[in-house]
Image: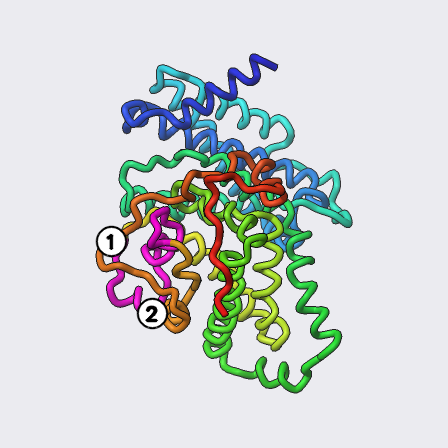
Amino acid sequence: MSKLNDARMKLRGELEAPPALRRFGSGWISGVLGLVLGVAGLLLVISLIAPGVLAIPQTETLRDNPWYRVGIHFTLISAFALSALSLVLRRERTLGTCGVAVTLGAALIGGSQATAEISSHMPLFFGVDFFVLNVLFTGFLFIPLERFFAHKDEQPIFREEWREDLFYYLVSSLMVQVLTFLTFLPAKSILTVAPLTDVRAWVVKLPFLVQFVVIMLLTDLVQYWVHRAFHRVPWLWKFHSVHHSARSMDWMAGARMHFLEILVLRSMTVIPMYVLGFSAVAMNLYVFMVYLYSTFVHANLGWRFPIVEKILVTPRFHHWHHGIEPESVDVNFSIHFPFLDWIFGTYHLPKDRWPTEYGLPGHPVPLGYLSQFKYPFRRKPTAAEPQPAKMDD
């Protein structure tokens, strides 16, 4: 066990290596890419072997496409080649060795030609493939953007607490079936009591663009007040403080949300678009868009949008919501349209300024997923923990 722990710490040390050991040509970049692609390939191969348990039904069409297996094959070859390159270039061979090992492991259990042993979906399944595709897509999209257009240039990819936030990605992806069921349960219950047949028939006939914009407006209005309640109601704040405990802002920071807050926030924001009967295409596109948008506004991007930020939420606008200074408390609750904060008196966007730091004063929220999950249920807050203001009359 001690040897395993030593190896884990050695690997973590390599991933979080100082800038001097991460320069181009040192083998760090190829080693990290090789390890990431190797782990991704291994998990995708495992999901091919047991799709009924470890894959979501929505990816079935994708898995049946021969190009999907070609993609896995290319991923494993790239992982092996990059890991081998790291072994050649880097004096410390931990990254390259681990990358080669997981790639060979994926090949030994079938690689891209792995056959399904559990094909029929079980009553409860876990989205392993969803997790991999999710992280690869957002990571390869936002990491280069954050490298070239960073707000904080000194912030590394593997910044402090990156493991906690990656684990949040894992949990939300694995539990996608449970989250989806519970998210839509309140909206479906409302329709059972009030079918709203005529209203739904009228809404679904609206032009697609109108539907999409109205969905954005309605969900943002609901989200604004739910979000504000999580800040103002002491017991709810205990859950939401987990999200605000992130000390760094980047593409992973938005994933840090307590499981119960995810359920409440999603179930409330789903109600208007599902109950009113917007088309499935408009709803699905909005869900995809808001996922990317949430990642975008949390990202470590220093882009300036002098005109756009008056109409739409930008990273600078949302970063002020996460700022640690007193002027950042209870401001900028909107996720799409800043005018909601302007109307309700919570708008804050100082000209040409960003927050100095992020997180909570005193940093009362502990590290680690399980500790953060249990944190809201503690009876007494710590002395350093900020208390939310009372709800406005």
Residue 265: give x, y in percent of width and height: 57, 59
Q: Are marks 1 and 2 in contact (CB under 8 Å)?
A: no
Which residue shows up at 70% across the image and 69% down it?
188
Query: Would residue 184 appear left or right of 84 to someone viewing this image?
Result: right
Which residue shows up at 50% across the image and 60% down it?
390
* 107 shown above or below 251: above
Between 64 and 375, the residue placed more toward the observer is 375
Amino acid type, callout 2: Ile
Q: Secondary structure at mark 2?
A: loop
Between 236 and 52, the residue placed more toward the observer is 236
Residue 323: give x, y in percent of width and height: 36, 49
Q: Is residue 112 visible?
A: no
Query: Would residue 393 appear left or right of 149 to someone viewing this image?
Result: right
Looking at the figure, which quarter contains the N terminus? top right
Q: Which residue is mark 2?
A: 311
Q: Earlier in the sequence, mark 1 or mark 2?
A: 2
* 261 shown above or below 148: below
Query: Would residue 250 appear left or right of 42 to someone viewing this image?
Result: left
Q: How many numbered circles are shown?
A: 2
Start and end of the magenta stretch? 303-328
Q: Which residue is mark 1?
A: 353
Amino acid type, callout 1: Arg
Residue 266: give x, y in percent of width and height: 58, 60
